[in-house]
Image (tube, rainbow, N blue to C red):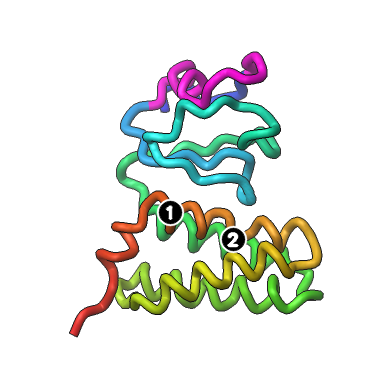
Amino acid sequence: MDKPGVYELVMGSSLKELLELAGSRETKMVQVGGASGRMLPEKGLDIPLSYETVLGAGAVTVFDKSRDPIEAALKTMEFFREESCGKCAPCREGTRVMIDILDRFNKKKGAYDDIAALETLSNTMNLASLCGLGQTAPNVVSDTLNNFRDEYLSRIKTG
């Protein structure tokens, strides 16, 4: 990022336009809307910035090609585990289990069943958590699974 900072654009401008203004290069993925926002791959940057699409809290974090989507998901889930009030089981237990699974992938010890478990947990947390934190916490996991599935598959332990 050549020019990190605070930018103000006309509502509906594309994420790609914002990144060009900031001098982004070698972009791998962008998290839009803060920790509970969306994690978009480089090919998805033509999306307009609006509240109806992805804007959320307005924060944009750019990850270059050296960054690991699974590690980014793990760090984000660790944040949500700390922020969870613990009142509802989907959030309290879901963040814990997701962290355990993501850590296995981070250590190249994932399993095919782990991918299915992450997808199920994401859906469960989204539907059954009592508040917005628990409902949106799994966004980063869902998005990295959808947009960077090959990264997960390459870390499945064989043999």
Bin the neighbour count of mark 2 within 10 Å (Cα to Cα): few under 14, some 14-19, many 20 and up. Answer: many
- The image shows residue 26, relative to residue 158, as above or below, that is above
The residue nearer to you, when weighing 114 against 77, is: 114
| Residue 141 point in image, percent of width and height | 51, 59
Q: Which disc, if any, is residue 138?
A: 2
Which element is circle 2 on? loop
Residue placed at 63% from the left, 40% from the top? 33
Instruction: Quadrant for residue 135, please give it.
Output: bottom right
Residue at left 40%, top 26%? 24
Residue 81 highlighted magenta (yes or no): no
- The quadrant holding residue 86 is bottom right
The residue lying at 52 percent from left, 29 percent from top is: 47
In space, the residues marked 1 and 2 are separated at their CA atoms by 12 Å
Of marks 1 and 2, which one's residue comes earlier in the chain? 2
Q: Which residues are magenta?
A: 8-24
Magenta-drawn stretch contains 9: yes
The amino acid at mark 2 is: Pro
Q: Quadrant of residue 137?
A: bottom right
Instruction: Residue type at mark 1: give it.
Output: Asn
Where does residue 156 sit, x and y in percent of width and height?
28, 73
Mark 1 neighbour density, 10 Å: few (under 14) some (14–19) many (20 or more): some
Farthest-out residue, left: 159
Residue 150: horizontal and vertical position, in percent?
29, 57
Please state which of residues 116 and 14 is positioned toward the viewer in this rendering: 116
Residue mark closest to the camera, 1 vs 2:
1
Question: Residue at label 1?
Answer: 146
The residue positioned 43% from the left and 54% from the top of the image is 146
Query: At which x and y percent is residue 46?
Result: 46, 26
Q: Quadrant of the C terminus?
A: bottom left
